[in-house]
Amino acid sequence: MTQRIDAHSLAKQLEEPDVRVIDVRFSLEQPAHGRSVFNAGHIPGARYLHLDEDLSSPIVPGQTGRHPLPEPEAFAALLRRAGVSQDTLVVAYDDGSGLFAARLWWLLRWLGHTQVKVLDGGFQAWQQAGLPVSQDTPRPLPDGHFVARPDDSKLIDADEIQSRLDDPSLQLLDARGPARFTGETEPMDPVAGHIPGAANLPCVANTTAEGAWLSPEQLGERFQPWLKAGTELVSYCGSGVTACHNILAAVEAGLAEPRLYAGSWSEWITDPQRPVATGD
C-alpha cells in the first residue's frame, strides 16, 4: 500500500469525517517558521504540530539527541485533541519533500497507527494544483479515541549499535548529506563524522527537485547496494528526523522496514567513548 497521497486525491477527501490533515512545516534554522507560514495559509481544516514542541520530547543535555522521541501517552493525547481515532486517516504535509512529514508518519506507525500518508510534494504541490488555501483557525473537533501501542521493535539504541559495529548483518544508513557524513562540515552538532561502518544514503534524493517522491522502483534501486540476504537495515541522521524519510522510502519501495536509531548522530556523540569515523 502506498504511503503517499497526491493533492487532488486529498482534496476529494477533505470533508470526510475520518480524515485529519496535519501541517508539520518547520525550519531547523528558524523554529518559528512553520507556525508563521501555517497562519499565513494552510490546507483547509489542517492542524499544526511543531517539530520541537509536539513531535519531540525535551532535550536532556549530554544524554539525548536534538529531537528525542515524544513520550507515547503525551503524544497520543495530542493526537486525540486533533480528533484522531484508531480508524482515522492522518495525512501529514510540510513545505515540499516530506522531510518533516515523514517524522509524523513514522511516529504514528510506531504507536500502532498505520492509517497515515504523506502528501506527495507537500504544500507546494497543493498550491501548484490551484487548490484552496485557508487562513482560518481550525474549528474545534470532538476528541478522538487514539490509543498508543508503541512497537519498540522499530527502534534500535546506541548500545546495540555499538555492540554490533563489527556485525556484517547490521547495515547503518546515514540520511545526511555527503559533506556531513564525511565530516567535511558539521553545521548542527559539535562533532563531525559518522558512525563507523555506516553508508551514506542522502534522504534528499528520495524526491525530485520539486519535492515529488520517486517511484517505488526508483526508490528500491537506491537501497539495492545494501539488500544482501540476512542484512538488517538501520536508518539514522543528525537527530532522528530525516532518517524517517529513508524509512518511508524503503517501505514505499516494498522493502522490509529499516529500524530507526532515534537518537542518531547528535546522541551518538554525547558519549566520547563511542567511535567516530570520517571520510568516505
Image (tube, rainbow, N blue to C red):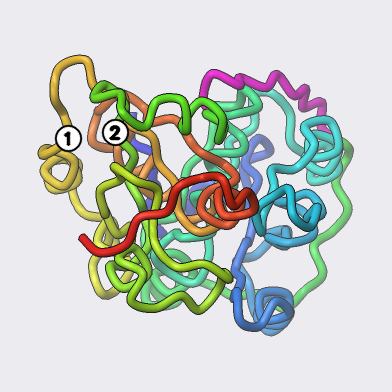
Question: Which x, y percent locates residue 170?
Answer: 31, 27
Give the mark nearer the N terminus: 1 vs 2: 2
Amino acid type indicated by mark 2? Gln
Amino acid on which the number 1 mark rests in the picture: Trp
- The answer to whether residue 148 is magenta is yes
| Labels 1 and 2 touching (C-beta < 8 A) | yes
- Magenta-highlighted residues: 144-155
Q: Position of residue 201 (x, y in %)?
A: 26, 53
Q: Which residue is mark 2?
A: 171
Measured Cα–Cα span from mark 1 to mark 2: 7 Å
Q: Nearer the viewer, mark 1 or mark 2?
A: 2
Classify mark 2: helix, strand or loop: strand
Q: Quadrant of the C terminus?
A: bottom left
Q: Secondary structure at mark 1?
A: helix
Residue matched to label 1: 226
Residue 50: quadrant of the picture:
bottom right
